[in-house]
Image: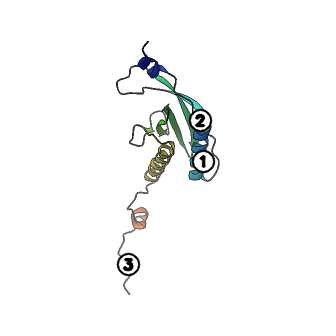
Amino acid sequence: MSREERAVNAPVPDFTEAEQNLVAAVVWQRYGKPVPIEPAESELRLGPGDDTMAVCPTRYWSERGAHFVVCKIGAGRFRCQFFYTDADHYGTGRDEYDDLRTCVLALLRVQADHEKLSAGVSSGATAADLSGDEYTGPPSL
């Protein structure tokens, strides 16, 4: 086996204590309370042409009906997604992050936006849009 093949087949390093603490801190900041974050493993293709799956350390948590995963795919490389059911998976629109904080923040922001849209709240909507009343403009003085 060549050096390059060994590097590709090498196990992905686990989350460091500092990385685990960072995820917990960002999640706590979002929800204002401690949220249990569990270690897990995910099998992922690390590259677009890869036929083999790599076992990747993962951090999982669930809050307000959504489930979140952040996967470490290499030293300083991360992927993330959230889901509601096995058929309802969402990403951030970015395949990979090289900064864990940016990864977790993007994941939480996209899920919060999705939550608002699901509740009928969208940016640019006015109170009249949400209540069904027609807006007639500011009152005349």
Write down the residue under mark 2: 16
Marked residue nearer the N-terminal end (1 or 2): 2
Marked residue nearer the N-terminal end (3 or 1): 1
Please name which of the two marks, 3 or 1, marks the residue nearer to the observer: 1
- At x 60% / y 48%, what residue is drawn? 25
Q: Is residue 73 left or right of residue 27?
A: left
Per the model, the C-alpha gap separating discs 1 and 2 is 14 Å
Judged from the image, the secondary structure of the residue bearing numbered disc 2 is loop
Write down the residue under mark 1: 25
Marked residue nearer the N-terminal end (2 or 3): 2
**For the C terminus, which image quadrant?**
bottom left
- At x 65% / y 47%, what residue is drawn? 34
Q: Position of residue 22 (x, y in %)?
A: 58, 44
Judged from the image, the secondary structure of the residue bearing numbered disc 1 is helix
Write down the residue under mark 3: 138
Residue sticking out furthest to the bottom? 141
Please name which of the two marks, 1 or 2, marks the residue nearer to the observer: 2
Identify whether 104 is placed above or below 59: below
Name the amino acid, label 2. Thr
Name the amino acid, label 1. Ala
